[in-house]
Image: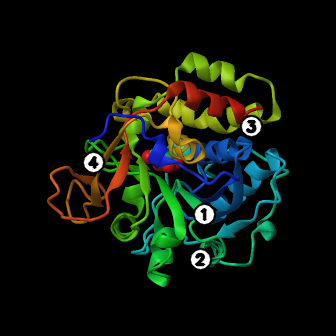
Amino acid sequence: MRGSPVWDYCNSAPSQKKLLLIDVDCGTDDAQAIMMAIAAPNVKILGITCVGGNTPLDNVCKNVLRVLQVCDRSDIPVYRGASKSILGESMHASDFHGKDGLGDVPDPDAPGLEHIQKEHAVDAMKRLVSKYPGQISLVATGPLTNLAIAVKMDPKFPEKLYSLYIMGGNMESRGNTTACGEFNFLADPEGAYIVLNEFLCKTYIATWEHSCRSKLSWEWYDQWVNTGTKKADFIKKIYAHSLQYSRSEKEVKAIVDGPGFISCDSYAMAAAIDGSTVTKVIECAVTVELCGKFTRGMMVLDLIDELKKKNKAFVMNGCDMKKFTKLMEACVK
Ligand code: BDR
C-alpha cells in the first residue's frame, strides 16, 4: 500500500503532448470523459475505438460521433471494434444510460455511421502503438474486449504502450450490476482477466468504489450543467435519464458512501491527463474471478502476494478533488 502522492511514477510523461488512445462503450460518462480529454491542452487524442457495452456497438459508434460533433472535433478518427464479449455475450446498461446510451434524447443532426473508419478498432490500436512505441496512454472505459483481442493478436502490444488506465472492477467486492460485479468487468470477465494478466505495462485502475468515494455534490452538478454553453447543454440533456435512475432504489443501494454525482469514466481519464489527480494507490497484483456463482467478474486484489505475479497494478484509492473538479469544469467550456 502507498499513502504518498503518486504522480511522480504515475505520470512522469513526455514533455510534449501526451498521446491518448481512448477505448469506450460510449454511454453518458464515457461521453463526458471524452469531452474532458478534448478539453485538456496537454493531450492529443490519436483515435477513439468503440466496443459494445453500455449500449450496442452501432449506438456506441454513433454516440462518439455525436460527442465529437458537439466539441467540433470530428477530425478525431473513430473505429468500430468488438460488438460482444470474448465469450460472445452482450450486456447493456440501458437502465442507466438509456437505450441509445446517451439518455434517449432525439438528435436529428447525429452524424451517420459512414463517418466511422473502415479499419477495425483492434487493427488501429495495433498500428498506432507500433507507430508511437512507448508513447501512448490507453484509456479504457468499457468492457476490455478490444484490449484482450489486441494482446492475443500481438503479445507485444502492452509493452508498446506508455501506460494503461482502466475504469472497471471493484476493490471491496462492491458491485453495481450484481452484488459483486461492476458493469465493465462483468460485461466481459474473460476480457478483463486477459488484460489484467497479460498487460505487463503500467496499469492504473479506477474502480467502482474509488469513483463513488470521489463523487461531486449535486449542487456542484446543477451549476456545472447550467453554465449555458453548448457542451453544458449537451451534458445536461444526455444525463437527464441517468439522473432519474440514480435515484432508483437499486442505484442508491449500489453507491458507496451516500449520494452525489459520479462520472465513473472521468476518474480514469483524469488520471491519464494529470497523474497528480491520483493522491493514493494500492499497489498490488490483480485478477478477476471467472467462476464464482455470486462473484463472477469481481476484481481480486492480491494483497498478500499469493499469486506471485510480477506485475503489480496501481489501484486508485484517493482523488485530488480540486484538480479533478477543474478538469470537469474545463470540459463544458
Ligand atoms: C462503468 O459501467 C458503465 O455503465 C459506465 O459507463 C462505467 O464505465 C461503471 O461501473
> In terms of sequence position, does the residue under pointer 1 or pointer 2 come before the other?
2
Q: Amino acid at mark 1?
A: Gln
SS under mark 4: loop
Tag 2 residue? 126
For marks 1 and 4, the one nearer the N-term is: 1
Q: Calculate the distance from the C-alpha at mark 1 to the C-alpha at mark 2.
A: 13 Å
Residue 28 coordinates in the image, percent (x, y): 60, 44
Local crowd size for mark 1, using a 10 Å CA cut-off: few (<14), some (14–19), many (≥20): many
Q: Which residue is mark 1?
A: 135
Report the amino acid beneath label 4: Cys
Residue holding disc 3:
234
**Residue drawn at x 66%, y 51% as measured from the top left:** 15
Q: Quadrant of residue 51?
A: bottom right
Tell me which residue sits at (47%, 71%) in the image. Answer: 159
**Mark pair 3, 1: CA separation:** 32 Å
**Mark 3 residue element:** helix
